[in-house]
Amino acid sequence: MSAPFVDRHIGTDRLAQAAMLKVLGYDTVTELVEAAVPPSIHTQSRGELSVIPQPASEREVSAELRSLADRNSVKRSMIGLGYYDTITPAVIKRNVFENPSWYTAYTPYQPEISQGRLEALINFQTMVAELTGLTTSNASMLDEGTAVVEGMLLARRASKSKSTVFVVDSDALPQTKALLVSRASAVGINLVELNLATLSPAELPDAFGVFVQYPGASGFVWNPSAVIEQAHTTGALAVVAADLLALTLITSPGDLGADVAVGTSQRFGVPMGFGGPHAGYMAVRKGLERQLPGRLVGVSVDAVGNRAYRLSLQAREQHIRREKATSNICTAQVLLAVMAGMYAVYHGPKGLRDIAREVAGRATSLAVLLRTAGVVSRHDEFFDTLTLDVPGGARAAAERAYDRGYLLNVVDDDTLSISVDETSTDDDIAQVVAAVAGSVGSVNSVEGTPADSQPSLPAELLRTSEFLTHPVFNTHRSETSMMRYLKRLADYDYALDRGMIPLGSCTMKLNAATEMEAVSWPEFAGLHPFAPRADVEGYLTLIDQLESWLTEVTGYDTVSLQPNAGSQGELAGLLAIRGYHHSRGDDGRTVCLIPSSAHGTNAASAVLAGMRVVVVACDDLGNVDVADLRTKIGEHADELAALMITYPSTHGVYEHDIVDICRLVHEAGGQVYVDGANLNAVLGFARFGEFGGDVSHLNLHKTFCIPHGGGGPGVGPVAAKSHLAPFLPGHEFAQKSEHPAAGGGSVVHGGGAVSAAPYGSSSILPISWAYVRMMGSQGLAAATEAAVLAANYVAARLRDHFPVLYSGDNGLVAHECILDLRPLREATGITVDDVAKRLIDYGFHSPTMSFPVAGTLMVEPTESEDLAEIDRFIDAMIAIKAEADAVARGVWPADDNPLVHAPHTAQSIAVGEWMHAYDRERAVFPVASLVAQKYWPPVRRIDQAYGDRNLFCACPPPEAFE
Amino acid sequence: MTDYSALTFTAEHEWIRLEPVSEGSPATATIGITSYAAGRLGDVVFVDLPEVGAEIANGSVVGEIESTKSVGELFAPLNGIVLAKNQSVEDSPELVNSDPFGEGWLIKVEFTELPELLTFAEYQALLGDDALTDDETDRAGA
């Protein structure tokens, strides 16, 4: 019999844990955790009536996932509406999508060890910028719908117009319109929907922005340049959602005068996955770069002047600007953006154009054949989508198509739309024509599929400008070349497949292979998010089970899996609070209390939920200052909407007063939002809903094993008490609106949508499902124990070398600890940056730098690391401290020592004369074990300021590398 | 070396230098941020300054100074009208670090009335242990 999964997931075995406990002076792990977690919040539930089944083995879970997959039915989707079937080149599927070197990497905050995915993201940005004809693209958005919302918010802050109106094209995607509605009212924006294709530009109302879908949701391709020009005369910005594949054939938004282009790159080789994850995009014209939300990769130089990539303009991010932030978007969809960028690298400009011509040609064939059969397309000019007038017959036609295995989009009783994609064949066209035309029997009755049909695009909009001329898009045509390019980039990077990534508050635990396997199965990957319920029963069962399991472990009543990032979960939770107060006539409750220690995203989310942030002070121990909380509650009693609090605190400590804090807020009529970023410290021991939370978001990409993907995807479900359920995110196209409720029965989520798809990033939910299924309740608690043990072990062993900034009861920390490096800087001049970069030379990813306290490192080892790796990290930290001490003693000069020059590349020790005060061996092999296992960073320390002062966010011209 | 005694300051770490003007012309002042502020911000990478002709109100946010680590706000230290902005600093934001009291000035403003500002001695007292020294180049992060 194979070992139980819990022993594969948790890195420290019984023996190792005994050794670690000895250092800490405890007999058992449970004793340790119960000493750390305040008794007042210990959960009363110990799983007596658990809905979480007993743990299954890896093999059993694979079989269960297989049977769930078998209950999904993959039809040929021709629904369109922003989701198209696509062919993921197998070389990309195997070497990126299913490769832990790509999917287990973290967000590239340490650029020296992230050059591979930074280059891949530069490819993505170049692709988007050139196809959209705009100057600068960011490194991806969460999905198209939220990208349009961000486009609206960008237009408002960049426009000189004082208007509160945002004009929306009536031919926009329906899910985009729904998102705009649920987001605009919270921030005081008025939406005006107009048929822009027929509107005389002079009739355009005064507005700060105008949104055009290009081509329209109906498939219609029309020239919006007159509308855009008119918008500009009134000071409005033009936001255009454009289909990237169509843009290979039609004039780019930039050439039409657009200020902002948004959309999705899904159809560039990323499976539909029942709604996600995919990489949305946003690109802007020159002058708006600093308004871009999310992440932006730029070019800089390293310490010796070599070209290097890094995240640009980070100071504009929400975690720095807090309540002054204009967007709460943190993460991107890196893994999916990498895939889409690589799709363009592999196909090149000609390949993409050929794919687009074939799609557009087949759409023409479809139109011609349907006309012959008496069904007329509403528009003569289209790219891939036809809207058909079939009075009274739309549903029947769609049912006939369904019987042949095709999904069409029923717009209403009289209207159908059909989208052609890269996977469509002539036979598909014939089948669909037969179904729509109502013929029975063999498809051979449809004759004469026109060969080599031309696209049906307006001549005035044919694209003439070049795109993707850079060598990277014109080199890797053979699979051998592509495979080697992907390998080379993967080798530049440090991911969990190399070693520990002890990032505090990020929970970089194991992403087990069994958990990952189902993600690329066609029954999970190949479904359209608006597929009929009968086709997705396996998914709905999996989603219901995961929701009920998450409900139980958090002590809430219901969970929504729709938010596709932690930031969106925060927003969904706060919008639910807003909806709740409004439903009771409490419109004046708009103040959100946020402790000063909170992650900046909290404040940004509150602002976007229409709330005003009031900061609550923290005491010297990093806990909420209860006296200040009372004062602030007193000052804002009638306006109090919510308190947002992270538990355990962002300082990695179990606060004692949490129960009282929640009570005080409730007594004043406020709601308590508990940020679940640190759930890994309490799972199985305390439940947010039990100790006073009304609503929380969880991060499945932290606590529940979804990999970080190098900076996305994430999943940020929102969990809430039943009184907030009616305000949790709903969705017009959800296959069902009821969700399981704690204790049985169901509740309806009736709030506005926060993601483009009803279940957000559905295709990665099997990962978290498999994790809980294999761990069981006890396994989850054991993981918490091992995580808390590991953090306390690190704290105990490093305490003599670096002060541990905060600790709680019995001197214990939670699942992470903050090492204070400020005294080291005082004594030696060595900075937290120097230590972080020197860790690279020792073969480690740095812990979280300067969050939540500047000049510190926050270490979270997680439960998945074994004792040998934890000790290797501790030994490295101690060795680095000794090196810093040597600098202080004058052994090495302050400006020439292994720390300030870290990290060291192979080139740095091999090329030219060695001129340093320390030797080469010290530079790259400071400990002997590195000789056998060395990670070589590809660049030296990167100059952040240079890149921000000389902003350049596309592939550098080849001569730049000469 | 900067003659600090010719400057007045705000608690938001801005300095104000009154410019000599001919009889009858409106009073003008040059405004920048102190070396202390520049040092705290770190490497300045971008400055966003008000347009020439803009009216600025004492205490309001009129611009931004962005470093690799954070975004600082520029507060108007007085009521006035912007006469000029420093184009060189927009093109080379590092001037804020290398010469905060000189080439790194931000805007010139025309005004009628001066609010109460801090003298050099008062500003030094505010900085306490971080008081300005004769040579501030190191601290401003040049």
Image: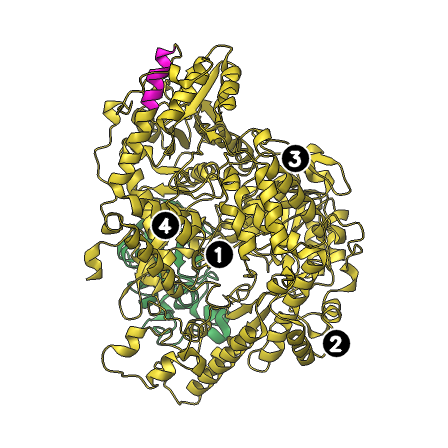
Chain colours: A yellow, B green
For discs 3 and 4, the disc positioned in front in the rendered view: 4
Give the chain letter at badge 4.
A
Residue A158 image point, x, y percent: 39, 40
CB-based contact (under 8 Å), mark 1 and mark 4: no
Q: Please identify the quarter of the rendering in which residue A86 is found.
A: top left
Viewer-closest of A730 and A704: A704
A365 in magenta: yes
Q: Residue A91 carries which label?
A: 4
Q: Please identify the quarter of the rendering in which residue A281 is found.
A: top left
Element under disc 1: helix
Per the rendered image, the range of residues in magenta is A363-373
Label 1 vs label 4: CA separation?
39 Å
CB-based contact (under 8 Å), mark 2 and mark 3: no
CB-based contact (under 8 Å), mark 2 and mark 1: no
Give the chain letter at badge 1.
A
> From what the image shows, is residue A942 above or below residue A420?
below
Element under disc 2: loop
